[in-house]
Amino acid sequence: MATLKCSYCGFGIHYHDEPDGTQYFLYSLEAWEDIRKNNIPIVCYDSADSGRMRYVWKCCNCGTLALFGKDDISVEKIFVPDTNIKDMNKTNAEYYIVFDDVYMEKIYDSNVTVSNLFTIFPQDCCKYCIITNKELFVFNNPNMKIPVKSYHVKPVNLSEEK
C-alpha cells in the first residue's frame, strides 16, 4: 500500500488495490486524442511514462489534491479546495480528461476503447480539468464555463512513503 501525508491537514492518504475514489487518472488532451484516433484500449495506455498521463491523489479528510509529477513518483503540486476563485486565468494551462479509480477499474475490466466508452458507461464517468500554475478547475463537461470545483496551489511540503 502506498501512503502520502496530506500537507494541508496531516491526514494519511492511503492508496491500495481496491478503488475508493482516492486516485485519479488524468489524460492530456493529446493523449486522449491519440487513444481515440488509434482506438487504443484505455487500459493499454495506463502509463505515466509518456508524460501525457498523470496521477492525482485526493485526501478523504479535507479534499486536498496531490498532483504527481510526470515522473509518477514525486508530488509536483498540492491543490487546496477554494470556493472563492473568481477568475480563470488559462495562461499556460494544461487540459485533461479525468477518471477516478472506481471508474478506471470498471474500464479496465471491460477493456473498453474510447469509441464505445459512452455506450458502456454514463457520460459522467469522466470529468474535465484545467491545471494552471496557480489553480486547478474541474468541469462535468468540456463546454461548461464555470467549474464545479476549484482549487488553489499550496507550496509542496509533505512526507512521502511510496
Image (tube, rainbow, N blue to C red):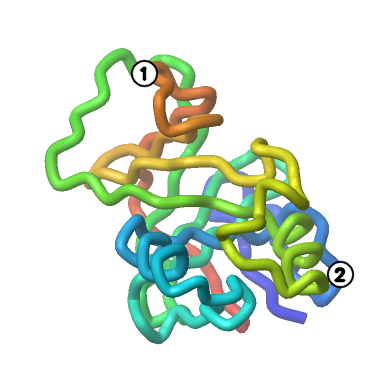
- At x 35%, y 75%, the residue is 70
- Which residue, given by chain and number where applicable, does mark 2 sit on? 18
Asked which secondary structure carries label 2, the reply is loop
Which residue is nearer to you in this view: 65 or 91? Answer: 91
Relative to 46, say whether 68 is above or below.
above
Residue type at mark 2? Answer: Glu
In this rendering, position of residue 65 left or right of residue 79? right
> Measured along the vertical axis of the image, is residue 57 above or below residue 72?
above
- Quadrant of the image for the C terminus? bottom right
Residue depicted at x 80% and y 63%: 106
Task: Using residue 162 as the reference point, say whether residue 68 is left or right of it.
Answer: left
Name the residue: 26% across, 24% down: 88
Q: Which mark is residue 52?
A: none
Q: Which residue is mark 1?
A: 145
Label 1 sits on a secondary structure element that is: loop
Left-right relation of 93 to 79: left
Q: Position of residue 6 (x, y in %)?
A: 59, 55
